[in-house]
Amino acid sequence: MLSIADLRTACAALPGSQETFPFDATTLVFKVGGKMYALTDIQAEPLTLSVKVRPEHGEDLRAAHEAIAPGYHLNKRHWVTVTLDGQVPTALVQELLAGSHALVVGGLTRAQRAELGL
C-alpha cells in the first residue's frame, strides 16, 4: 500500500513536478508546467489517487481492476481514480503517475517544455 509520503517521493522524482494545494487544505495537487497531472486527498481513508490517462487505457484499467474507477469530480474519459488499498500493484500506480505526467508534458508548448528543461 502506498502512503502520502510514497506519492510525494514518486512525484518529486518526475521532472518539473510541483506540489500545490489550490482547492483546500487537504487536496494535494501535483502539477507540471502549471497543469495538473495527479491529485489526492491527504486525509482520505483509504487513500485515493486521480491521474490522467488516454481514454482507451482508462477503459481497460477500469475493466481489469476493481479499485480503478472513473475520475472522481474529473473528466471521466481522461481521468481515473485509483483506491490505494493494496489491490492495484505499486508498480502499476507508479506507471500511471509517470504516464499522467508524460501526457501533460506532451500537451505543453515547446517553449514551456524548454523552460522546464524537458
Image: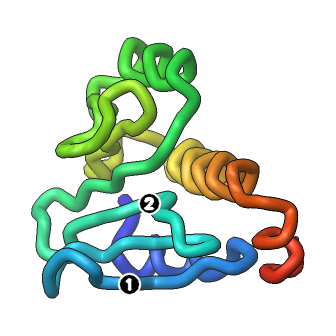
For residue 94, above or below residue 25: above
Residue appearing at x 53%, y 36% in the figure: 53
Among the two numbered marks 2 and 1 on one chain, the one whose residue lies closer to the N terminus: 1
Name the disc covering residue 38, or none. Answer: 2
Residue 29 location, quadrant: bottom left
Please indicate whether residue 62 sits to the left or right of residue 96 in the image.
left
Residue type indicated by callout 1 = Thr
Q: Position of residue 101 (x, y in %)?
A: 63, 57
Residue 61: x and y in percent read 46, 23
Give the residue drawn at x 18%, y 45%. Answer: 73
Crowd rating for badge 2 (residues with CA inside 10 Å; few <14, some 14–19, many 20+)? many
The quadrant of the picture occupied by the N terminus is: bottom left
Left or right, 73 with respect to 1, comes to left
Residue in the picture at 27% in, 43% down: 74
Secondary structure beneath dot 1 equals strand
Asked whether 68 or 37 is in front, the reply is 37
Q: Which amino acid type is marked by label 2?
A: Ala
Which residue is labeled 1 in the image?
Answer: 20
| 61 on left or right of 27 | right
- In terms of depth relative to the viewer, which is nearer, 31 or 95? 31
